[in-house]
């Protein structure tokens, strides 16, 4: 493939993934609101409600506070939205290979996941509002808190694949080719189940959803990081939130549920792409339901001090237990 | 600034207490309970006036709150509507002509919808929100 072809494929792929991320992200937000409403014995908004909200926000006045740093204030939402789309380019979507192919691995994705959060921090500090400043400080604390369990989960999986003799265990293609559940014995399956639960609990913090939304906390901080944002900029953060939900669910799917429908049922390539895509969306919805909707409906918000101890202590210890089980499983075969 | 159909189904409200006795607040919270579920029409309470389309004001505007009310009103991005909940904000109510009032609300900021009552029932508040939506629609018709 020539350079022009590659460039064309990347540009078109990026545009397609941006469109997919926008539509799927807002739809999954709408489904989340509908499911949450049903769990609270309400009817809830229509599933297209986030689209209506974004359409409205795009037509509102875009206020820049007097104390704000305008260029940073305007840049932060764009960076947040663009960087979440970028992560999507590294993740496999069903049977469709990532746009950037094998260029990125799991470690890159873990690093890229911090970029939208850092953009929000920059936007919060640039707002020139005390509420936004406190929100930005809290966002940084939460960012550091959930990194530990997330890193444990990622390392444990890659280590086990390496122990099983897989080359390049951090690459998503290798993880997709060797589903972790098939590699290990019973002890390892328990370990991986623990890590799956941990990843599901890291998701709400990544997305600033209840119970880990101390940085937005509309009842205490009046919206925290986003307090000064209105109109177009707020719409960009809203859309980034939707895309991030897809990214986190797609990451969990890529690591823990990498199966495709076409692996089990024989079908023609054209049908396989559609079927795998539909199967992928079903898996994403399932993960999003358990890691976002169910958790946020069943819990109240943690205080910022509790968030740190929950992640560093409880999920840190739980992650190490999972890692230990996986290590024992790897050596059980040797002994 | 152009209003669109999106406003009909996505009205975000910010609640401002200008010295109310908390009776209207209880009824506003009652209006967003699952029994009434205004979220099915896209109506929700937001924490910041910057995110709001609808400013819900309760209370008769005591002297100290006049400046704050003006500032919050200015912070709501256009296009916006103001809804005054409770008889205090409409006329002063039991505090009519009191020496420590700068109100009622429409002496300080322009009000679009009045919801009378002491306190108004949740049904009345939701009806007021519907009238506020109609006002936004009418503005849209006039501008088009």
Image (spheres, coloured by chain):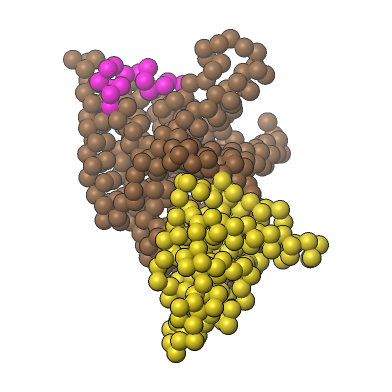
Q: Nearer the viewer, residue A136 or A15?
A: A136
In the image, residue A328 above or below residue B104: above
Could you say where residue A145 lies in the image, as x and y percent from the top left? 31, 50
Q: Is residue A124 magenta?
A: no
In the current view of this chain or complex, which residue is farthest to the bottom?
B99
In the image, taking residue A217 as reference, residue A79 lies left or right, namely right
Name which quarter of the figure residue A323 lies in: top left
In the image, residue B80 above or below residue A51: below
**Residue A164 visible in this rendered orientation of the protein:** yes
Tell me the quarter of the image containing the C terminus of chain A.
top left
Residue span colored magenta: A177-191
Q: Nearer the viewer, residue A160 or A204?
A: A204
Could you say where residue B20 lies in the image, as x and y percent from the top left? 43, 73
In the image, residue A60 above or below residue A246: below
* Residue at 42% over, 50% down: A208
Q: Is residue A186 magenta?
A: yes
The chain letter corresponding to yellow is: B
In the current view of this chain or complex, which residue is farthest to the left?
A335
The chain letter corresponding to brown is: A
Could you say where residue A211 lies in the image, as x and y percent from the top left? 36, 48
């Amino acid at each position: 493939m020539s350079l022009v072809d590659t460039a064309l494929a990347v540009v078109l792929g990026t545009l397609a993934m941006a469109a997919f991320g926008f539509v799927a992200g807002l739809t999954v937000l709408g489904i989340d609101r509908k499911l949450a409403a049903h769990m609270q014995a309400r009817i809830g908004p229509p599933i297209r409600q986030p689209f209506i909200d974004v359409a409205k926000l795009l037509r509102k006045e875009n206020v820049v506070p007097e104390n704000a740093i305008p260029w940073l204030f305007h840049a932060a939402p764009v960076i947040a939205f663009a960087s979440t789309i970028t992560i999507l380019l590294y993740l496999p979507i069903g049977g469709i290979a990532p746009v950037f192919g094998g260029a990125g691995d799991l470690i890159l994705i873990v690093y890229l996941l911090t970029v939208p959060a850092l953009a929000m921090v920059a936007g919060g500090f640039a707002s020139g509002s005390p509420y936004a400043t406190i929100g930005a400080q809290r966002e940084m604390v939460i960012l550091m808190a959930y990194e530990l369990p997330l890193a444990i989960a990622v390392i444990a999986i890659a280590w086990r694949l390496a122990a099983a003799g897989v080359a390049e265990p951090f690459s998503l293609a290798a993880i997709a080719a060797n589903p972790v559940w098939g590699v290990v014995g019973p002890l390892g399956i328990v370990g991986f189940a623990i890590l799956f639960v941990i990843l599901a609990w890291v998701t709400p913090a990544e997305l600033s959803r209840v119970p880990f939304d101390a940085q937005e906390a509309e009842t205490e901080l009046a919206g925290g990081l986003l307090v000064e944002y209105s109109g177009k900029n707020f719409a960009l953060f809203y859309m980034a939130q939707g895309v991030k939900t897809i990214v986190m669910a797609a990451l969990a799917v890529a690591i823990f549920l990498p199966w495709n429908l076409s692996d089990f049922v024989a079908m023609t390539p054209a049908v396989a792409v559609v079927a795998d895509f539909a199967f992928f969306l079903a898996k994403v919805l399932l993960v999003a339901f358990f890691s976002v909707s169910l958790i946020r409906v069943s819990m109240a918000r943690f205080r910022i001090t509790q968030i740190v101890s929950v992640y560093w202590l409880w999920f840190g210890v739980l992650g190490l237990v999972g890692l230990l089980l996986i290590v024992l499983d790897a050596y059980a075969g040797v002994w | 600034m152009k209003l669109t159909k999106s406003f009909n189904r996505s009205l975000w409200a910010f609640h401002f207490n200008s010295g109310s006795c908390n009776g209207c607040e209880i009824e506003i919270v009652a209006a967003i309970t699952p029994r009434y579920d205004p979220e099915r029409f896209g109506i929700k309470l937001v924490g910041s006036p910057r995110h709001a389309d609808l400013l819900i004001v309760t209370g008769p505007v005591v002297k100290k709150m006049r400046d704050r009310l003006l500032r919050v009103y200015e912070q709501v991005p256009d296009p916006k509507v103001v809804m005054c909940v409770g008889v205090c904000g409409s006329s002063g109510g039991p505090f009519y002509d009191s020496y420590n009032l700068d109100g009622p609300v429409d002496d300080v900021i322009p009000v679009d919808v009045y919801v009378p009552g002491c306190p108004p029932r949740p049904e009345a508040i939701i009806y007021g929100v519907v009238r506020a939506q109609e006002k936004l629609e009418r503005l849209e018709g006039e501008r088009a």
